[in-house]
Image: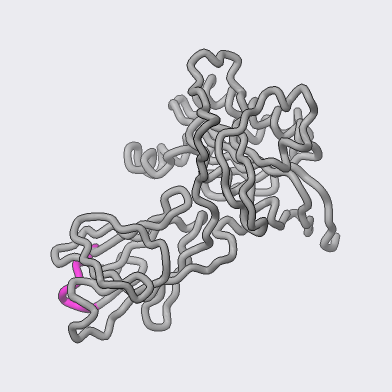
Amino acid sequence: MGRQSSTRAVLFADVSQSGALYQKLGDTAARNIINACLAAMADVLPRFEGCLVKTLGDAIFCTFPTADLAVLAASEMQAIVSGTRPGNYPVGIHIGLSYGPVLLEESDVFGDTVNVAAYVSAVATREQILTTEAMENALSPELKSCIRPVFQTVLKGTGRESTVYQVLWKPDRMDMTEVNFHAHKVIPGDTGSLLVSLEEETIRINQWRPSITIGRSQECDLVLSDSFASRQHLTIRLMRTRFYLIDHSINGTFVTLNNREEVHVLRGELPLDSSGQISLGRSRAEPSNEIIAFAYDRRSQYRI
């Protein structure tokens, strides 16, 4: 089959705080629990005409023929995971939904609708289902009554603020947080993936590779030889939609953002909200041949 255009509802469901699960239980036990959770979510799909496109680490990526079926499936996934404890462990999931045109190619699905669903999944928290205006517009009146507006954001490719909605899947809403409709709440949009470069080597940090380590240790993702750099000097990590530099070193990290004044970060964090340069253990003004550059690739960090 060649590439075809279609309209689909897209769902991303991700195991919440899976990194902490690996740290607490170890690789084997955590992977078994996550696999059980992914299998429980996949078992929901046939009842709602869903199609599993692929698994992506600790997430599943699915499509549905209608918006209603996607919302019903997402609600069922949340109910099953919270109620049955897959793998006999209290895990949680967060889900993002979108609706619109996609490109179908063999067994894969592409397009802005896919990227937007991945983005709203990333900004959702444990036990949340978030979705978009396009999904809200496509829902039946019965299911429109089960969602509420919660945020504003600028979705990739639109250039305008649009509403992010929450799907109210729990039967008991007594403990639900009330939404302050008088506040203008804009959540960070998808600014793109972060490219981090040392000489000829470049690493892309995005939803699918959310962190890297830099230092003298051969176990780091980017390895330097400067004796002022610590073995595990720093981490650059994606947290929801923003990138942070986290220093672990003895001598600190010197960061210059967009030719602004150099900042010294020592055992602290700094948001990397623009392009710039990083020097480990010494100022960029001191003699050193190992300068790390970083810059945004403005294309979606949630591209599949």
Q: Is residue 114 above or below residue 138?
A: below
Report the side of 231 relative to 33 (left or right): left
Residue 235 in view in this figure = yes
- Residue 125 is situated, as x and y percent measured from the top left of the image, at 48, 36
Image quadrant holding the N terminus, namely bottom right
Quadrant of the rendered image containing residue 234: bottom left
- Residue 82 is situated, as x and y percent measured from the top left of the image, at 52, 23
* Magenta span includes 135: no
Residue at x-position 46% and y-position 25%: 88
Residues 37 and 177: in front is 177
Report the side of 166 relative to 202 (left or right): right
Residue most extreme to the front: 182
Residues 5 and 180: in front is 180
Q: Is residue 146 above or below residue 205?
A: above
Residue 216 in view in this figure = no
- Residue 286 is situated, as x and y percent measured from the top left of the image, at 18, 83
Magenta stretch: dominant SS? loop
Q: Which range is magenta?
A: 225-232
Residue at x-position 55% and y-position 59%: 301
Residue at x-position 56% and y-position 13%: 172
- Residue 223 is situated, as x and y percent measured from the top left of the image, at 30, 73
Residue at x-position 48% and y-position 31%: 92
Image quadrant holding the C terminus, namely bottom right
Q: Is residue 16 above or below residue 107?
A: above
Quadrant of the rendered image containing residue 133: top right
